[in-house]
Amino acid sequence: MEIYQKISGLNLAQQTEIMKNSFFFTDLLPLESMSRLIPNPMIRLNMAKMMGLKYEFHYPTENLIACLVWCAIFIFGSYWILRKRDW
C-alpha cells in the first residue's frame, strides 16, 4: 500500500527512480532483507565486464542489521518456547 501511494500517477522513469532511491519499511521484513543481503553477483559481474566497468559490491548495512535482529528474535523466541514447554 505504501509503495503504491508513492508511485501512483507518475510515469515509468519517475517510478523506477523512486523505487530505487526510496526507503520502504517492507524492506526490513525477514525474507526481503535476506534476499537483498544475498544478491546474484554473477549477473552484475558479467555486465560490468561487458561494459568495461569496475565491479564493486557493498553490503547494505540496514539489511544486515535487520537480518541480525530477526535472527535474534527467532533464536530467543525458540528458546523461550522450548523452555516454557519442557519445564
Image: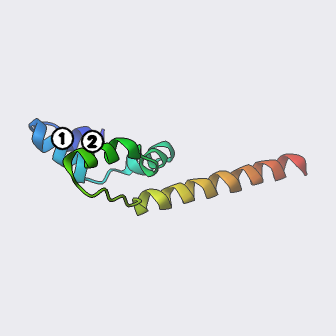
Image position of 18 (left or right of 57) = left
Residue 8: quadrant of the picture: top left
- Secondary structure beneath dot 2 equals helix
Identify the residue position indicated by label 2 in the image: 3
Work out whether residue 39 or residue 29 is closer to the camera in this orientation and state it: 39
Q: Is residue 77 left or right of residue 83?
A: left
Q: Please name the residue shown 56% across and 59% down the image.
A: 68
Q: Position of residue 60 (x, y in %)?
A: 39, 59
Q: Please say if 10 is above or below 55.
A: above
Viewer-proximal residue among 60 and 15: 60
Q: Is residue 60 above or below residue 14?
A: below
> Is disc 2 surrounded by few (<14), some (14 to 19) or many (20+) residues within 10 Å?
some
Where does the image place residue 4, in percent across and percent down from the top left?
24, 37
In this picture, is 24 found above or below 7?
below
Question: Counting other residues with Cα less than 10 Å from the Cα at mark 1, is it few (<14), some (14-19), or many (20 or more)?
Answer: some
Residue at the (27%, 42%) spot, across then down? 3
Q: Are marks 2 and 1 in contact (CB under 8 Å)?
A: yes
Residue 54's quadrant in the figure?
A: bottom left
Q: Label 1 is placed on what type of residue? A: Ile
Query: Which quadrant would the N terminus be assigned to in this image?
Result: top left
Q: Residue furthest right?
A: 87
Instruction: State the CA–CA distance, disc 2 to disc 1.
Output: 6 Å
**What residue is pinned by disc 1?**
7
Question: Can you give x and y, in whole percent of width and height, for residue 51 in the image?
Answer: 20, 47
